[in-house]
């Protein structure tokens, strides 16, 4: 497959067309942003680590029957994915209170939730990705109710699979964000699954192994990302 011109550049990735219209070529960047782009920086080797970590999770999920856009890795920081039409809904799943949920409902970070919390955000930078509900999604026609039912079920299955996978490497999955898109009429899990889009805490020490180290200036950001990759692959 041939990498052709760039068709989209996001905050963390570049997407290229290929000579096959069914596939995109994705390049993971070292650029990091937070707070809707207000804070900017770079994390050395982040693109390489997130590309590899995402591939591990996509392959794991595929092996458990979840359909994703992942096709194959093509270099340290590039993967081939199925061409998706992105659904403009960010799906956040939470097991333990952290980040914006702590502020929204007034519980301290680290509180174990008695039930998994599922949230939807409207993927719109100009609006700052506001929290929305299923009724807003229907009114904006971002996805059909049937698609949202499938997305909800898939997001919760991903939770079970990832928690079970991360437990033996001593990582708690606090929360994460997923994105979905359609490919030939089918809804597939897209985007990335990495320390940029998940909160990973060491089970024993509670140490943060994710982008909160960058958001909150905690130091050793690259080391934390590397540690996640090391625990997943031994690399
Ligand atoms: P939050 O607590 O800031 O709402 O974040 C919830 C989860 O979603 C956390 O794992 C980080 C992830 N996330 C993204 O992947 N992209 C984003 O733009 C935001 C705000 C959060």
Image (cartoon, rainbow, N blue to C red):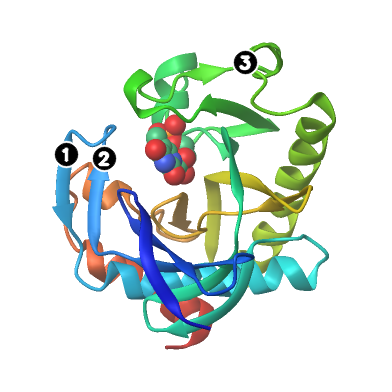
**Quarter of the image with the C terminus in it:** bottom left
> For residue 74, which numbered disc appears in the image?
none
- The mark lying in front, picked from 3 and 1, is 3
Specify the quarter for ligand 1.
top left
Is residue 228 visible in this depiction of the protein? Answer: no
Q: In this view, does 93 lie above or below 184?
A: above
Q: Is residue 33 above or below residue 57?
A: above
Q: Judge from the rendering whether residue 43 lies leftward or rightward of residue 79; answer left or right.
A: left
Q: In this view, does 134 lie above or below 92?
A: above
For label 1, the SS is strand
For label 3, the SS is loop
The spot of residue 87 in percent (x, y) is: 61, 37
Q: Judge from the rendering whether residue 37 lies leftward or rightward of residue 210; answer left or right.
A: left
Q: How far apart are marks 2 and 3 (CA)?
A: 26 Å
Nearer the observer, 162 or 182: 182
Q: How far apart are marks 3 and 1 (CA)?
A: 29 Å
| Cβ atoms at labels 1 and 2 below 8 Å apart | yes
Which quadrant of the figure has residue 112?
A: top right
Upstream in sequence: badge 2 or badge 3: 2
Residue for point 60% across, 65% down: 21
Residue tagged 1: 39
Residue for point 70% across, 29% down: 143
| Cβ atoms at labels 2 and 3 below 8 Å apart | no
Residue tagged 3: 140
Residue, far bottom: 235
Residue for point 26% across, 40% down: 34
Residue tagged 2: 34
The spot of residue 153 in percent (x, y) is: 80, 41
Q: How far apart are marks 1 and 2 (CA)?
A: 5 Å
Q: Judge from the rendering whether residue 55 lies leftward or rightward of residue 210; answer left or right.
A: right
Queried on whether the Cβ of the residue with tag 2 lies below 8 angstroms from ligand 1, the answer reads yes
């Amino acid at each position: 497959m041939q990498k052709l011109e760039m068709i989209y550049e996001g905050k963390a990735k570049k997407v290229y067309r290929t000579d096959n219209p069914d596939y995109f070529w994705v390049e993971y960047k070292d650029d990091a942003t937070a707070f809707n782009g207000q804070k900017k920086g770079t994390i050395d080797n982040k693109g390489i680590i997130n590309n590899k970590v995402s591939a591990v999770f996509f392959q794991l999920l595929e092996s458990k029957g979840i359909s994703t856009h992942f096709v194959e890795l093509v270099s340290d920081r590039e993967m081939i994915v199925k061409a998706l039409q992105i659904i403009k809904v960010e799906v956040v799943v939470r097991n333990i209170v952290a980040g914006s949920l702590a502020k929204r409902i007034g519980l301290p970070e680290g509180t174990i939730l008695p039930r998994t919390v599922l949230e939807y955000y409207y993927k719109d930078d100009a609006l700052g990705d506001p929290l929305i509900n299923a009724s807003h999604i229907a009114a904006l026609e971002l996805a059909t109710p049937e698609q949202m039912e499938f997305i909800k079920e898939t997001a919760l299955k991903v939770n079970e699979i990832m928690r079970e996978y991360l437990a033996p490497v001593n990582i708690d999955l606090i929360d994460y964000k997923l994105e979905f898109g359609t490919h030939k009429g089918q809804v597939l899990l897209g985007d990335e699954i990495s320390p940029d889009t998940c909160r990973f805490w060491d089970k024993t020490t509670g140490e943060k192994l994710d982008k909160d180290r960058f958001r909150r200036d905690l130091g050793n950001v690259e080391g934390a990302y590397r540690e996640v990759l090391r625990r997943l692959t031994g690399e």
